[in-house]
Image (cartoon, rainbow, N blue to C red):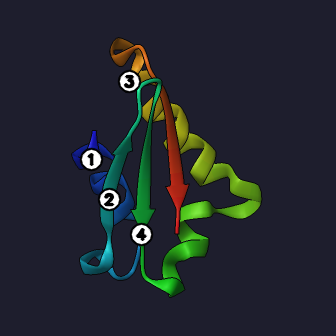
């Protein structure tokens, strides 16, 4: 899942070398923290959050087999 998030984010930003994804897992959920260069935060979020919503939709769809809630935190 980390690779999926990282691959999508690298395609969106101007500074792909600054993209990193970390994972925090609890018993009922998994939180992925996507960290990008400060200049690229707006590109990952998009106008009115549309790109972030699309990214979350793709990750939620691929995480259906995990049977856990999945969250993405963009920093």
Residue at 77%, 58% in the rendered image: 48
Circle 4 residue: 35
Badge 1 marks a residue whose secondary structure is helix
Q: Is residue 18 above or below residue 22?
A: below
Q: CA distance from mark 2 to mark 3?
A: 16 Å
Circle 2 residue: 21
Name the residue nearer the viewer: 15 or 18.
18
Where is residue 60? Give x, y as percent: 48, 28
Badge 3 marks a residue whose secondary structure is loop
Label 3 vs 1, first from the N-terminus: 1
Q: Is residue 2 left or right of residue 53?
A: left
Label 4 vs 1, first from the N-terminus: 1
Label 2 vs 3, first from the N-terminus: 2
Q: Is residue 21 above or below residue 13?
A: above
Q: Which mark is residue 66?
A: none
Q: CA distance from mark 3 to mark 4?
A: 20 Å
- Residues at marks 1 and 2 touching, judged by CB atoms closer than 8 Å: yes
Circle 3 residue: 63
User: In which quadrant is the N terminus drawn?
Assistant: top left
Q: CA distance from mark 2 to mark 4?
A: 6 Å
Badge 2 marks a residue whose secondary structure is strand
Residue at 27%, 54% in the rendered image: 7
Label 3 vs 4, first from the N-terminus: 4
- Residues at marks 3 and 4 touching, judged by CB atoms closer than 8 Å: no
Q: CA distance from mark 1 to mark 2?
A: 6 Å
Name the residue nearer the viewer: 47 or 73.
73
Where is residue 30? Give x, y as percent: 42, 36
Q: Is residue 30 left or right of residue 42?
A: left
Q: Which mark is residue 2?
A: 1
- Residues at marks 2 and 4 touching, judged by CB atoms closer than 8 Å: yes
Q: CA distance from mark 3 to mark 1?
A: 11 Å
Q: CA distance from mark 4 to mark 1?
A: 12 Å
């Amino acid at each position: 899942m980390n690779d999926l998030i990282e691959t999508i984010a690298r395609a969106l930003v101007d500074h792909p070398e600054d993209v990193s994804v970390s994972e925090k897992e609890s018993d009922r959920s998994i939180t992925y923290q996507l960290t990008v260069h400060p200049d690229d935060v707006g590109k990952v979020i998009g106008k009115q959050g549309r790109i972030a919503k699309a990214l979350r939709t793709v990750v939620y769809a691929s995480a259906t087999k995990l049977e856990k809630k999945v969250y993405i935190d963009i920093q």
